[in-house]
Image: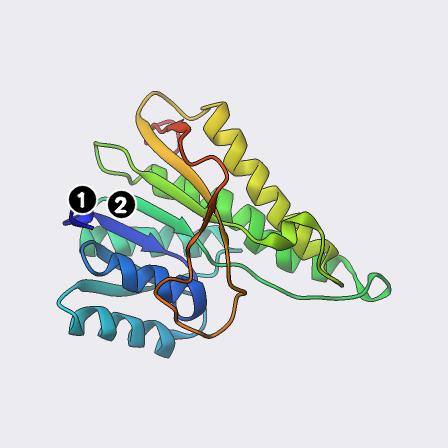
């Protein structure tokens, strides 16, 4: 991972599970902002593991359903580590309900974090990319195929993440600066196992280019 040396990576939802594995893997070379919403202790544990291995990491907090939180989270990461080179949109809300039990609150809790959160985090992060541009990695789920019970809203939110990723990569819409956009489908479920290989998956469109303009994204 020598090509990541000195780069800055922001990983959302990195206090446990797949996000923790991604942050730990990046921490072997890159400087990592370990994003979390509520589990500060978990995020600090990941930072300690990265530092114990000789890496550089910080914790940054933000509720991805709130634009102000996203802006402050990214501002802190940039102030302490430098411009962002890699964004990993990993954080997501999973809440499973049968159709009779669904309501507006259930829908918005999931979509505000899983879809609007991805869009807003990407927009703000791109505006704070380094002059060389950067990469965006969106973590998806097999639930996007709609094959999980009681997951109508969660599955739809992850299908939206896939569409966002493909749309940005195939139809660059935010300017001329070069970067890359990927979507990953994890091979393991979202759980508390901090597996450093938990983010391995299938690239849906890994070779396509995404044009990123920091000014246009503001």
On screen, residue 213 above or below 113: above
Relative horizontal placement of residue 106, taking residue 101 as reference (left or right) = left
- In the image, residue 128 lies at what x, y percent? 29, 40
Which residue appears at 18% of the width and 55% of the height? Answer: 29
Which residue is located at x 34 percent, y 71 percent?
43
Eye-nearest disc, 2 or 1? 1
Q: Nearer the viewer, residue 151 or 42?
A: 151
Vertical order, 166 against 102 (above or below): above
For residue 148, side relative to residue 114 (left or right): right
Q: Name the residue under label 1.
A: 3
Residue on which disc 2 sits = 84
Residue count near mark 2 (Cα–Cα under 10 Å), binned few <14, some 14–19, many ≥20: many
Q: Where is residue 187 in the image (x, y as percent from the top left)?
A: 50, 58
User: Which residue occupies 28% across, 51% down?
Assistant: 9
Q: Residues within 10 Å of mark 1 (few under 14, many from 20)?
A: few
Q: In front: 102, or 28? A: 28
Indicate whether 33 appears above or below 137: below
Q: Is residue 76 visible?
A: yes
The reply to whether callout 2 and callout 1 are in contact (CB within 8 Å) is no
Q: In this view, does 43 lie to the left or right of 114?
A: left
Question: Which quarter shows the C terminus?
Answer: top left
- Say which mark, if any, is on residue 64: none
Q: Nearer the viewer, residue 137 or 128?
A: 137
Q: Position of residue 44 (x, y in %)?
A: 30, 74
The first of marks 2 and 1 along the sequence is 1
- Secondary structure beneath disc 1? helix
């Amino acid at each position: 991972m020598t090509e990541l040396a000195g780069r800055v990576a922001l990983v959302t939802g990195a206090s446990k599970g797949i996000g923790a594995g991604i942050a730990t893997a990046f921490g072997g070379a890159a400087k990592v902002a370990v994003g979390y919403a509520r589990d500060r202790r978990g995020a600090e544990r990941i930072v300690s593991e990265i530092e114990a291995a000789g890496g550089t990491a910080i914790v940054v907090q933000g509720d991805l359903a709130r634009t102000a939180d996203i802006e402050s989270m990214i501002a802190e990461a940039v102030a302490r580590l430098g411009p962002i080179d890699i964004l990993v949109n990993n954080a997501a809300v999973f809440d499973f309900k049968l159709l009779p039990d669904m309501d507006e609150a259930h829908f918005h809790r999931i979509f505000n974090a899983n879809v609007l959160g991805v869009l807003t985090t990407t927009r703000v992060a791109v505006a704070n990319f380094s002059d060389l541009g950067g990469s965006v990695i969106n973590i998806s789920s097999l639930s996007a195929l709609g094959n999980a019970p009681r997951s109508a809203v969660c599955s739809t939110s992850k299908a939206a993440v896939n569409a966002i990723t493909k749309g940005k990569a195939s139809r660059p819409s935010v300017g001329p600066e070069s970067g890359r956009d990927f979507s990953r489908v994890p091979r393991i479920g979202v759980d508390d196992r901090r597996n450093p290989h938990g983010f391995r998956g299938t690239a849906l469109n890994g070779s396509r280019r995404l044009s990123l303009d920091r000014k246009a994204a503001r």
